[in-house]
Image (cartoon, helix red, strand yellow):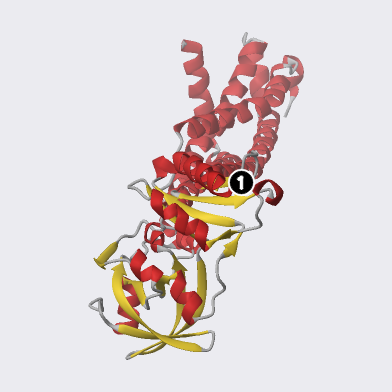
């Protein structure tokens, strides 16, 4: 332990005597380590943010699709299938809706004309978003059956279109498909929270009105529902049971006995695929950034070789005074290890700061992994020791007589 302390002390003295050169040697290590830490922290934070944003929208949604029309003995689902599932609505299964569609149009209000998006479906559409109705109510099945001209808007849309959120009972004229109709506002949904990457991916838009699907078919000539898939909306913990129940009920309704007629796709499956893709991308970018570490290691080796040349006479004197080959080698290995260790610590600090700054810019929470920090520091030291072996070995094998003659 005493010898090791002496090696470290001498190594520190040599590095301190050549501050500028030592710092430039560390620079490659600093850049490599900080890049890896920054990418892992920012990438993990962005992934978690996107996952949370998407999960808040899609976590309880399941798509039931006709996989084999021959086995299913039908080519598409209809409104009758959706109406059939209404009998099974409970606290866990909110219902089924046509694969939610959108229609773009113009809204004429006292404040002017604005672009508007009509989102339509069954009353189960209420549960598609985790943002609740904070004032009024969502449209009911009786209004759905009668194709009532009612709708629900967001708080942000109310403020933009009317200048206030006190809009219950007011009407708004919407023009779409060259047809104009008035829609009575019966509910206000809390505005979608989120910004940056998450908001872009979820397509959050404030100027939307949610209306009954039947109203759209009657007043805007939207085609009647005929699709190979149905959107089911359930509580997140009830997703699997919901899939099984709906599939069995529809199989009984249509007299399907063969397996493989339907297929289901849930957010859980999509989330796993998304995580896998994001992990591969993050790992790839981190590996690319890690190449800077190799470049930094080569820089360490180069500087250590220069140091051996500059200190040839010193090495000769030490060997003539009894220093063993192993001691000389350990001395230069200590210097290489110290360069990369200090560079690694500085790189980790810079990487943590940059990762935090990037996550703050995209409004995400940085994801720091203690394991990745430890591995990065260990890898940094390993790089220094690996690339320091050759210079150290060269120094240790110098002939003391020839070294003493060196000018």
Of residue 227 and residue 81, the one placed in the foreground of this image is 81
Of residue 217 and residue 19, the one placed in the foreground of this image is 217
Q: Residue at x 64, y 18 (%)?
A: 329
Q: Residue at x 57, y 73 (%)?
A: 223
Q: Position of residue 323 (x, y in %)?
A: 62, 11
**152 horizontally vs 394: left or right:** left
Q: Residue at x 65, y 20 (%)?
A: 315
**128 horizontally vs 156: left or right:** right
Quarter-wise, where is residue 295 in the image?
A: top right
Q: Residue at x 47, y 81 (%)?
A: 219
Quarter-wise, where is residue 304 in the image?
A: top right
Q: Residues within 10 Å of mark 1 (few under 14, many from 20)?
A: many
Quarter-wise, where is residue 74 in the image?
A: bottom right
Of residue 218 and residue 318, the one placed in the foreground of this image is 218
406 vs 244: above or below: above
Q: Quadrant of the C terminus?
A: top right
| Circle 1: element type | strand
Q: Position of residue 159 (x, y in %)?
A: 30, 78
**241 horizontally vs 399: left or right:** left
205 vs 72: above or below: below
Q: Is residue 55 visible to the viewer in this orientation of the structure?
A: no
Of residue 329 and residue 309, the one placed in the foreground of this image is 329
Q: Position of residue 258 (x, y in %)?
A: 65, 39
**321 horizontally vs 148: left or right:** right
360 vs 242: above or below: below
327 vs 307: above or below: above
Pointer 1: what residue? 262
Q: Is residue 304 visible to the viewer in this orientation of the structure?
A: yes
Q: Position of residue 297 (x, y in %)?
A: 65, 35
Q: How many marks?
A: 1
């Amino acid at each position: 332990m005493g010898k090791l302390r002496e090696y470290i002390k001498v190594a520190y003295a040599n590095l301190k005597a050549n501050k500028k050169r030592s710092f430039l040697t560390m620079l490659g290590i600093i850049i490599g380590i900080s890049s890896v830490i920054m990418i892992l922290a920012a990438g993990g934070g962005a992934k978690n943010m996107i996952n949370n944003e998407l999960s808040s929208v899609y976590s309880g949604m399941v798509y039931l699709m006709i996989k084999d029309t021959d086995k299913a003995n039908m080519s598409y689902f209809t409104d009758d299938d959706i109406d059939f599932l209404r009998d099974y609505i409970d606290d866990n299964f909110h219902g089924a809706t046509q694969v939610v569609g959108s229609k773009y149009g113009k809204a004429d209000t006292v404040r002017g004309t604005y672009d508007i998006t009509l989102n339509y479906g069954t009353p189960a559409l209420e549960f598609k978003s985790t943002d609740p109705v904070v004032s009024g109510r969502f449209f009911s099945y009786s209004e759905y059956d009668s194709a009532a001209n009612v709708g629900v808007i967001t708080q942000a849309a109310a403020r933009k279109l009317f200048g206030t959120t006190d809009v219950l009972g007011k009407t708004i004229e919407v023009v779409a498909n060259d047809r104009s109709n008035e829609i009575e506002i019966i509910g206000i949904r809390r505005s979608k929270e989120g910004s940056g990457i998450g908001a872009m991916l979820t397509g959050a838009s404030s100027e939307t009105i949610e209306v009954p699907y039947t109203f759209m078919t009657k007043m805007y000539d939207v085609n009647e529902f005929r699709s190979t898939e149905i959107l089911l909306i359930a509580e997140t913990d009830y997703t699997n049971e919901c899939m099984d129940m709906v599939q069995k009920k529809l199989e009984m309704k249509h007299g399907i006995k063969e397996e493989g007629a339907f297929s289901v796709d849930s957010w859980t499956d999509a989330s796993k695929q998304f995580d896998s893709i994001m992990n591969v991308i993050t790992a790839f970018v981190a590996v690319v950034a890690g190449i800077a570490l190799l470049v930094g290691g080569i820089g360490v080796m180069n500087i250590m070789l220069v140091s051996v040349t500059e200190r040839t006479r010193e090495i000769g004197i030490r060997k003539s005074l009894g220093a063993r080959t192993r001691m000389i080698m350990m001395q230069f290995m200590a210097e290489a290890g110290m360069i990369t260790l200090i560079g690694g610590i500085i790189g980790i600090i810079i990487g943590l700061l940059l990762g935090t700054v990037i996550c703050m810019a995209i409004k995400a929470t940085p994801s720091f992994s203690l394991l990745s920090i430890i591995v990065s520091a260990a890898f940094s030291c390993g790089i220094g020791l690996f690339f320091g072996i050759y210079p150290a070995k060269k120094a240790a094998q110098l002939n003391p007589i020839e070294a003493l003659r060196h000018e």
